[in-house]
C-alpha cells in the first residue's frame, strides 16, 4: 500500500502522507491541506471520518467489538483489577507498582476535603436542580479555589492536580445527590477504598452505621471501569478542545460534564429506565413492545439495544451482564421495572429479528438496571457515568497538553449571502 494519498481538484493533484496506527488503522494526514491547495478544506459534520489527534490511550474496534485501555483488554482489567488501578493505568500509561498504587491512593485521600465555602454555592441551587447541572457548576467553581495554573511540564504539579481532581469530583457528585434528596452532606472516610467511599458518601445517613455490601461494591467497581474511556466521543473531544486553549483541568472537566449531560451522549441509561417505566404504565405487555420495535412504521425504539459504534455485541455489556445478574440475585429486589428489563433481555438475546440485526443489550441497558437496583435516582445516572469517565478525561487532557497540541479551531464552508450594501432603516 502506498504511503501517499493523491487528491485531485480542478485538474490539479496534491499529495498527502499516510499515517498508520499500531493496530493497522490508516489515516490521511491533511493538516497542510488548506495551505498547499490555496484554501481547500474538507467537510465532515460530526467529525465521523476525521481524526482530531493521535492518542495512545484507548483502542476501539466497533466492527469486532474490541475495547482496550493502553493495550489491556477490558475483560482482563474488569476481572483482575479495580477502578482506581485502571484509572492510574489510563492516566499514566502503565499499571502501577504496589508502591505507586499506595501513593496514588493516599494522595487522593489527602485531597478529598472540599473547601467549606463550596457549600454556599451548593445552597444556592434549588432542590429541583438537575444533579448534572450541580456537578458541572461545582466542578467549574473548583477553579476559583485553585486559581494557580498547573505547569504541565512539572511532574509533581501535574500529579497533584490529577489526584486532587480524582479526589474531589466524587465528593461533589455525592453532594449533588444529597442536595436533590434534601439530606445532610457526607465526607470521605480515609479508612475506605475509593469505591466504598463513593457509596458511603452517597448512601450513608447520620442515624445509622454504614456497612458496605461487597457484591454491590464489585458491581459498581466494574461498571465504572467500563466507563473509564471510550476514544474521542463528544465529552472527551470537548475536554481536549477546551484544554487546547490551555484552560485548566477543572474547567475542562466541567465542560466535559456539560457535554455528557446531553441525552444523545450520557443520558442513554436514563432513557432505558424511562422506557421500562412507560411500558409498565401501559400495562407491562412486553410482547406488544417487541412487536412495536419490529414495526418499521412505528416510531417506538427499544432503548439500550444496539450501539452506534459497536456493530457486534458491546464488549462492555458482556462483562457487566454477569455483575448485574449477581447483584439482582443478591439484593432480591422485587421491582416490576427490573422484571420487564429481564424479560426484554431474554427476548432480545434469542429473537431472530434482534440477533440478525445485532441489536443486543448494550452497556447502557445493564448500567441502568444496576443503578436502579442500587436505589440511585434516574437523574443521577449520568453523574455516575461522569465519575467513571473522569480518569479518561484526565488522561486525554494530560496527553493533549504534553503533546503540545495546537488550539482547536475547526474550519467552515460559508454558504451565506455574498457582500451586500447597507440600507438605512428609513429605506427598508
Image (cartoon, rainbow, N blue to C red):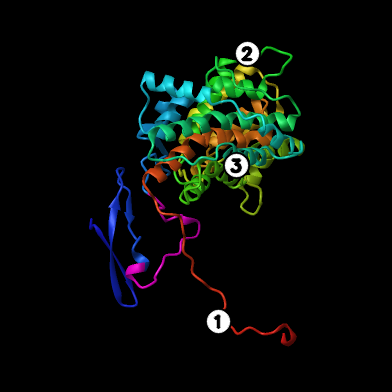
Q: Residues within 10 Å of mark 3 (few under 14, many from 20)?
A: many
Q: Is residue 142 above or below residue 239?
A: above
- Whichever of labels 1 and 3 marks the residue nearer the N terminus, that label is 3
- Residue at 63% x, 49% y is 295
Residue 265 in view: no
Q: CA separation, marks 2 and 3? A: 32 Å
- Whichever of labels 2 and 1 marks the residue nearer the N terminus, that label is 2
Q: Which residue is farthest left?
A: 2
Residue 428 in view: yes
Per the picture, the main secondary structure of the magenta-coloured stretch is: loop
Q: Is residue 39 magenta?
A: yes
Which of the two discs, 2 and 1, sits closer to the camera?
1
Residue 390 at x, y = what percent?
51, 35
Q: Is residue 107 magenta?
A: no
Q: Secondary structure at mark 3?
A: helix
Q: Which residue is mark 3?
A: 140
Q: Which residue is mark 1?
A: 419
Which residues fall within the magenta stretch? Answer: 35-53
Q: Which residue is mark 2?
A: 211
Q: Secondary structure at mark 2?
A: loop
- Whichever of labels 2 and 3 marks the residue nearer the N terminus, that label is 3
Quarter of the image holding residue 334?
top right
Amino acid at each position: 500500500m502506498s504511503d501517499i494519498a493523491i487528491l485531485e481538484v480542478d485538474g490539479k493533484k496534491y499529495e498527502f502522507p499516510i499515517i498508520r496506527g499500531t493496530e493497522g488503522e490508516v489515516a490521511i494526514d491533511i493538516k497542510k491541506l488548506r495551505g498547499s491547495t490555496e484554501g481547500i478544506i474538507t467537510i465532515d459534520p460530526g467529525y465521523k471520518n476525521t481524526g482530531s489527534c493521535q492518542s495512545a490511550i484507548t483502542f476501539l474496534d466497533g466492527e469486532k467489538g474490541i475495547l482496550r485501555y493502553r493495550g489491556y483488554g477490558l475483560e482482563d482489567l474488569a476481572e483482575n483489577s479495580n477502578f482506581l488501578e485502571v484509572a492510574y493505568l489510563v492516566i499514566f500509561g502503565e499499571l502501577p507498582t504496589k508502591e505507586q498504587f499506595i501513593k496514588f491512593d493516599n494522595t487522593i485521600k489527602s485531597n478529598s476535603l472540599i473547601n467549606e465555602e463550596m457549600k454556599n454555592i451548593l445552597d444556592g441551587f434549588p432542590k429541583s436542580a438537575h444533579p448534572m447541572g450541580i456537578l458541572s457548576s461545582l466542578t467549574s467553581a473548583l477553579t476559583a479555589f485553585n486559581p494557580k495554573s498547573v505547569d504541565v511540564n512539572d511532574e509533581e504539579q501535574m500529579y497533584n492536580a490529577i489526584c486532587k481532581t480524582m479526589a474531589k469530583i466524587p465528593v461533589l457528585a455525592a453532594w449533588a445527590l444529597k442536595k436533590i434528596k434534601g439530606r445532610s452532606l457526607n465526607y470521605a472516610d480515609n479508612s475506605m477504598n475509593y469505591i466504598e467511599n463513593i457509596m458511603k458518601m452517597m448512601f450513608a445517613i447520620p442515624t445509622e452505621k454504614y456497612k458496605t455490601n461487597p457484591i454491590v461494591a464489585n458491581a459498581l467497581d466494574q461498571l465504572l471501569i467500563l466507563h473509564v474511556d471510550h476514544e474521542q466521543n463528544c465529552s472527551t473531544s470537548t475536554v481536549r478542545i477546551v484544554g487546547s486553549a490551555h484552560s485548566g483541568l477543572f474547567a475542562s472537566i466541567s465542560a466535559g460534564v456539560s457535554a455528557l449531560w446531553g441525552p444523545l451522549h450520557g443520558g442513554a441509561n436514563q432513557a432505558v429506565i424511562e422506557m421500562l417505566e412507560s411500558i409498565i404504565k401501559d400495562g407491562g405487555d412486553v410482547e406488544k413492545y417487541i412487536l412495536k420495535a419490529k414495526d418499521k412504521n412505528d416510531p417506538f425504539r427499544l432503548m439500550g439495544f444496539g450501539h452506534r459504534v459497536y456493530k457486534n455485541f458491546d464488549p462492555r455489556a458482556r462483562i457487566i451482564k454477569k455483575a448485574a445478574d449477581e447483584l439482582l440475585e443478591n439484593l432480591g429486589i422485587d421491582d416490576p421495572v427490573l422484571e420487564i428489563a429481564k424479560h426484554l433481555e431474554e427476548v432480545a438475546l434469542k429473537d431472530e429479528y434482534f440477533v440478525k440485526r445485532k441489536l443486543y443489550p448494550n452497556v447502557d441497558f445493564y448500567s441502568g438496571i444496576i443503578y436502579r437496583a442500587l436505589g440511585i435516582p434516574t437523574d443521577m445516572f449520568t453523574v455516575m457515568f461522569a465519575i467513571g469517565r473522569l480518569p479518561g478525561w484526565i488522561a486525554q487532557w494530560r496527553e493533549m497538553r504534553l503533546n503540545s497540541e495546537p488550539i482547536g479551531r475547526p474550519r467552515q464552508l460559508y454558504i451565506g449571502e455574498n457582500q451586500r450594501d447597507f440600507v438605512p432603516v428609513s429605506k427598508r
